[in-house]
Image (tube, helix red, strand yellow):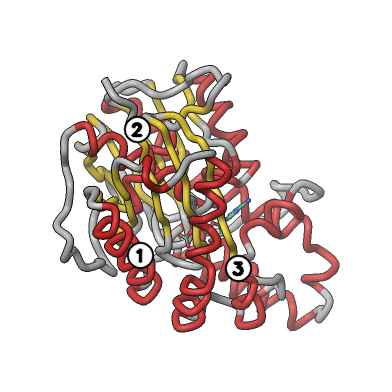
Amino acid sequence: MDKVYILAIESSCDDTSAAVLVDNCLLSNVTASQAVHEAYGGVVPELASRAHQQNIIPVVDAALKKAGIDKSNLSAVAFTRGPGLLGSLLVGTSFAKGLALSLNIPMIEVNHLQAHVLAHFITQANQEEHSPSFPFLCLLVSGGNSQIIQVNAYNDMRIIGQTIDDAAGEAFDKCAKVMGLPYPGGPHIDRLAKQGNPERFVFAKPNIAGYDYSFSGLKTSFLYFLRDHLKDNPDFVQENLPDLCASLQKTVIDILMKKLIKAAKELRISQVAVAGGVSANSGLRQAMLSAGEKYNWEVFIPPLGYTTDNAAMVGITGYFKYQDKDFCPIDAAPFARVEI
Ligand code: KG4
């Protein structure tokens, strides 16, 4: 069979990324991040769209060059159709349309959340393949999502549990903000937690039925706890920062792992993966490995480069869909909100 060359575009939030794959093998993955948002303590949608517009051509150009192929070799263009910021998605979608029309090749729409899960199937030259087999469970944790997904096939994913309020990443970021840490706070908490005592402080854990999550109670409990201590000691945060971070991180991880362990046990699934921005957390990665040993799971943890938004994961999803000739019409418009 002829080789399939896919150019993939990801522009759902504040990373402009392009990747080239030959079949399921990654040739290049180039990402331009947007420092412009740092000063605002969060992503500013209008600024994100403008930065994507500036970045998209150089990023695609670099991805093609790094892959060592010409655009005339491409079999299809895969792009993130949603969910995400509409203005950001429009840049990637419009670019994909222009390129697909000019090269007369098909377009493949990709669900951003599915792509995070399927990142576990990306292979690289001279690297051993280590991908889950179906069915597996995937804990998808990011700034906008906290879900347990039962993955029956690349195109058959069922959300069996999800947050009823804040996402895990949001809890990290909001608690980091009240401690005066920069945005996004998750990586700072991770770094500081390494020097702290995770048993020092105890925060509220939710009591929710089934496999669903809730993080808003933890956020409130953390906020009130700090407020009470700051009344007596205005330097409380500075004096206890590593212990606060370690205790908070442990609470988030305990909440996440409890439901994942329950789901794996009850559904009798022993292939368990983690994905999304929060899967970069070193404590969570360690907790997955420990649970793997304890419960006899085969554990799948993504390389750090695939935890944040990237086009490689869009490309692998595009490759699976290409095999089924699952193409989308040229008038496809992006979706800000869409389920997996
Ligand atoms: O998937 P992602 O890049 O995009 C969004 O959903 O926006 O996830 C970003 C989230 C942020 O909340 C960030 O704080 C969190 O992932 N994050 C982390 C770490 N690295 C990124 N949270 C905890 N520990 C980390 N090392």
Q: Residue 9: x and y, percent? A: 40, 55
Residue 253, compared with residue 32, is above or below; it is above
Q: CA distance from mark 3 to mark 1?
A: 37 Å
Quadrant of the frame with the N terminus: top left
Element under label 2?
strand
Q: Nearer the viewer, mark 1 or mark 2?
A: 1
Look at mark 2 in the image and give the residue it sits on: 137
Q: Are marks 2 and 3 in contact (CB under 8 Å)?
A: no
Which disc is residue 69 wearing? none
Label count reads 3
Disc 3 or 1, which lies upstream in sequence? 1
Q: Are marks 1 and 2 in contact (CB under 8 Å)?
A: no
Disc 2 or 3, which lies upstream in sequence? 2
Q: CA distance from mark 1 to mark 2?
A: 34 Å
Element under label 3?
helix
Look at mark 3 in the image and give the residue it sits on: 175
The kind of residue on which mark 1 rests is Phe
Residue 117, compared with residue 298, is above or below; it is below
Quarter residue 135 falls in: top left
Q: Residue 287: x and y, percent? A: 57, 34
Q: Residue 224: x and y, percent? A: 59, 75
Q: Residue at x 37, y 40 (%)?
A: 73
Residue 314, compared with residue 223, is above or below; it is above
Left or right for 164, reference 140 = left
Disc 3 packing (10 Å; few <14; some 14–19; many ≥20): many
Q: Residue at x 29, y 45 (%)?
A: 76
Disc 1 CB within 8 Å of nearest ligand 1 atom = no
The kind of residue on which mark 2 rests is Leu
Look at mark 1 in the image and give the residue it sits on: 95
Disc 2 CB within 8 Å of nearest ligand 1 atom = no
Element under label 1?
helix
Q: Residue 215: x and y, percent? A: 45, 61
